[in-house]
Image (cartoon, helix red, strand yellow):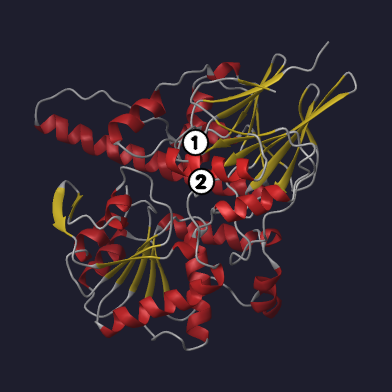
Amino acid sequence: MHLRAKIYSWGGAEEVTGSKHFLRVDNQLIMVDCGAFQGHRAEAEEKNRNWSFDADKVDSLILTHAHYDHCGLLPLLKKKGFEGNIYSTPATRDLANLIMMDSAHIQAKDIEYLKKKALKKGEVFDKQPLYTERDVLECLEHFITISYHRPFIVSENVSAQFYDAGHILGSAITVFNINKNAKDLRIAFSGDLGRKNLPILRDPEPIPKVDYLVMESTYGNRLHDPIESATDQLADVVRQTVERRGKIIIPAFAVERTQELVYILHLLNDKGRIPNIPVYVDSPMATNATSIFRVHQECYDEEIRQAFIDHHKNPFGFNELTYVVSTEDSKRLNTLKESAIIISASGMCESGRILHHLANNVEDPRNTVLIVGFMAQNTLGRRILEKHQEVKIFRELHTLRANVVVLNTFSAHADYNDILEYVSALDSDRLKKIFLVHGEPEAQSNLKRKLEEKGYSTSIVKYGQTYQL
């Protein structure tokens, strides 16, 4: 019998969110990630609820990392009939638990609000959340955690191994090895690929020789500033805003980006390079995520070990820093008169406490909104990044008078030079084709051209289209 394998995607194809990729080997169906779509509310709602595949036909799942657009619909997969194993690194499992629970809580609150609103209008409202906290707990029972470099059996004739992707805590490049009748086929899924020299984390690891590579392309048309300049740029933004007696509002992902910012602000504060102003992390999830970061020191790079861990210092805590948990304390931040740094979620400004801080601060020209991460199309964060004259927050229009500063140095995604460098380290004699996923069309077409100029056969994965290996 011949070895038969194919891949296809029902999410994260010619788009950035909603990653759902599939590897079929004979009669075994392996899924890589089960992420939520983000963007236009109606479109995201439709895609998140109604799937083009049967969950109960999926035999096993690999979770590359714990960002919401990669793990956010795992409880719904279970709810729809999935009964297999979910394989991830230990840190990914802990962070995914946090993110899925947070999502379930937000959904419950949203439904409660919409029901009250419908009741006042005398309307019937029977919509249910995608999943509940109980669904999350049932999903977590399917997790099997595997450390980096430890081979494990996924299904008959298929084994896999995790390598550090350097993107967020616990993120993994997954290398599948299919061995049948003395035939051998090796396929790698990058998940989201990180960058060299990021704070806290190790660099993306090289992987063994592969036949096929499924590669993310989020920043396939962009180059980041050197990560080394992040500290200088952040210090400049803080000093200039304080001179105007303004506040710095930072929408940040609760996982990874918040911890990076706190780490760098700690270094700047220790060296006296920024004024002594209060720093608030206003996100219960970010506070909990930071606790998980402190537990999983096996993911740290050598720099953070030498600077903090070996000296028994907490890299995520210093005198000016306050973690805000209660709603009452969060509301008090809106009455601040003096300069301060407020870091809050969500990173794309689609939900959470950041919306209140933006509503209260975007109209003041003394303030700075600091963009430090990717903003997907059709999100509030993208509209602020593009400096729209007016932005809608809580269904009310606000004039955007605050300074908007974009620091792409903080991006945890590889840019196109990073990807070209990473791919060039692979054995091109064995590498037959690269498949591009997780990117907007313009980014993907540019990266495809760059890779093909280097001699790599490259395809952009289309939604629902099958590719024979």
Residue 305 against residue 8 in the figure, above or below: below
**Residue 60 spot, x, y in % from top left:** 66, 26
Numbered mark located on residue 35 in the image: 1
Q: Secondary structure at mark 1?
A: loop
> In the rendered structure, which amino acid carries the disc numbered 1?
Gly
Residue 310 vs residue 95: left or right?
right
Give the quarter of the image for residue 436.
Answer: top right
CA gap, disc 1 to disc 2?
A: 8 Å
- Identify the residue at the far top of this view: 1
Identify which residue, 283 or 406, lies in the foreground.
406
Numbered mark located on residue 464 in the image: none
Q: Which image quarter is the C terminus in?
A: top right
Count neighbours of disc 1 (C-alpha within 10 A) and say few if under 14, some if 14 to 19, many if 20 or more.
Answer: many
Numbered mark located on residue 67 in the image: 2
**Residue 461 spot, x, y in % from top left:** 54, 29
Residue 268 against residue 141 in the figure, above or below: below
Residue 356 vs residue 150: left or right?
left
> What's the residue at 50%, 40% (across, down)?
444
Residue 144 against residue 310 in the figure, above or below: above
> What's the residue at 64%, 76% (across, down)?
308
Q: Secondary structure at mark 2?
A: loop
- Identify the residue at the far bottom of this view: 272
Residues at badges 1 and 2 in contact (C-beta under 8 Å)?
A: yes
**Residue 220 spot, x, y in % from top left:** 51, 47
| Residue 362 appears in view | yes
> In the rendered structure, which amino acid carries the disc numbered 2?
His
> What's the residue at 72%, 15% (across, down)?
26
Residue 85 vs residue 393: left or right?
right
**Residue 13 spot, x, y in % from top left:** 49, 32
